[in-house]
Image (cartoon, rainbow, N blue to C red):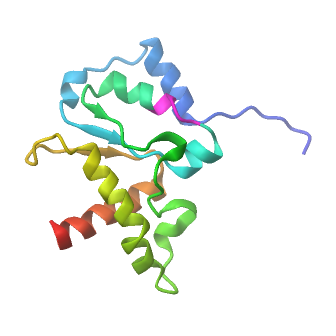
Amino acid sequence: GDLNIPRESALVLLDEIVGSGKLKFDPSRNDFPVTLHDPCNVVRAMGIVEPQRRILRKIAPKFREMTPHGVDNYCCGGGSGFAIMSGYNFAEWRTLVSSRKKFLQILDAFKNEPLEIPKYVCAPCSNCKGSIRDILEYYIRFEG
């Protein structure tokens, strides 16, 4: 219609708030390795690549980038609702193809960290969170 209402991602707004110092964080409370999954919709469709990284670098001193990352990051298989699709053996394909690639990418991000230390994968998309949770549960259970 005729309305031109400005809108912005919560990531950009949160980056501004964190960067301004209005929110105080104690990074020592996040003394564990953290990596970032770049959701396809966020980095490719919306072009938001750096705000989430600036936030994590400010609050998580052990932030580890995945390789590749940003617009070149591997899809987790959960985008566009793929995480909830079940017909035509899609879940099996997702687990054996795209999810496997993402699992190996996550392992690589933490390769220099001791196994016993808890690690955290940040995924700023609810579909991706569900997909990555499923990936980790599947591969840790069957290959752990």
Prevailing secondary structure class for the magenta stretch in the rendered image? loop
Q: Is residue 129 left or right of residue 13?
A: left
For residue 59, which quarter of the picture? top left
Q: Does the magenta stretch include residue 49?
A: yes
Residue 52, percent across and down?
Answer: 46, 33
View extreme (left): residue: 116
Quarter of the figure with the C terminus: bottom left
Q: Is residue 19 left or right of residue 118?
A: right
Residue 14, percent across and down?
Answer: 49, 28
Residue for point 26% across, 70% down: 138
Residue 62, percent across and down?
Answer: 24, 30
For residue 132, which quarter of the picture? bottom left
The residue closer to the viewer here, 91 or 8, is 91
The residue closer to the viewer here, 84 or 114, is 114
The residue closer to the viewer here, 83 or 69, is 69
View extreme (bottom): residue: 88
Residue for point 40% across, 55% down: 129
Count of number-bearing discs:
0
For residue 63, which quarter of the picture? top left
Magenta-highlighted residues: 48-52
Q: Is residue 53 left or right of residue 104?
A: right
Q: Does the magenta stretch include residue 85?
A: no
Q: Is residue 141 left or right of residue 6?
A: left
View extreme (right): residue: 2
